[in-house]
Image: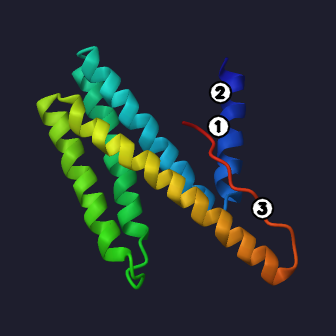
Amino acid sequence: MIQSQLQRNKYLETTIQTATPAQLLIMLCDGAIRFTRQGMEAIKEQRFEDTNTNFLKTQDIINEFIITIDRESPIAGNLLNLYDYFKMRLIEANTKKNIEPAEEVLGHLIDLKDTWIQAAKQYNQLAGQASGSTPKTTHSSVV
């Protein structure tokens, strides 16, 4: 069992180290979606320590989104406001042990992930056309 866990960790480490920025962003979205779902499930089961842990993990990922935003981008301000809203709603879900705010954030995270996947595909197609190579496909790893 320990050996398989070590192999999995090595695989994940290699995956992260070789991922493009777009793939990393999509992986982070996957993690935020997974932790939000786990936090919601923990509320249903009244495992409030797990609720807190999972929503904090989601907030940590959202903080990574905030840190990495290109502040010169025309959409930076809107993304910052959106991410702040996500954090506010997750805090509300966590403190009130109410699923509804987390469900809202989950829906937005899924939409955001889909948007990043489409943007990555378009970028890869344009980059492939410019260089004359075949575009690389971007996939989601975990949901």
Rendering coords of residue 4 (x, y %): 71, 24
**Is residue 21 visible in the rendered structure shown here?**
no
Report the front residue among 43 and 60. 43
Q: How many residues crowd around disc 3 within 10 Å: few (fewer than 14), some, or many (20 or more)?
A: few
The residue that label 1 is drawn on is 9
Rendering coords of residue 10 (x, y %): 70, 41
Q: Residue 136 got which mark?
A: 3
Q: Nearer the viewer, mark 2 or mark 3?
A: 3
Image-based side of 1 in relation to 65, left or right: right
Please report the residue visible at 63 percent of the width from the left and 64 percent of the height from the top. 120
Q: CA distance from mark 1 to mark 3?
A: 25 Å
User: What count of labels does the image hold?
Assistant: 3
Sequence-earlier tag: 2 or 3: 2
Q: Secondary structure at mark 1?
A: helix
What amino acid does circle 1 point to? Asn
Q: Are marks 1 and 2 in contact (CB under 8 Å)?
A: yes
Q: Residue 5 got which mark?
A: 2
What amino acid does circle 3 point to? Lys
Against 113, residue 52 (above or below) is above
Q: Determine which quarter of the picture holds residue 134.
A: bottom right
Against 63, residue 110 (above or below) is above
What amino acid does circle 2 point to? Gln
Please report the residue visible at 37 percent of the width from the left and 80 percent of the height from the top. 71
Q: Secondary structure at mark 3?
A: loop
Q: How many residues crowd around disc 2 within 10 Å: few (fewer than 14), some, or many (20 or more)?
A: few
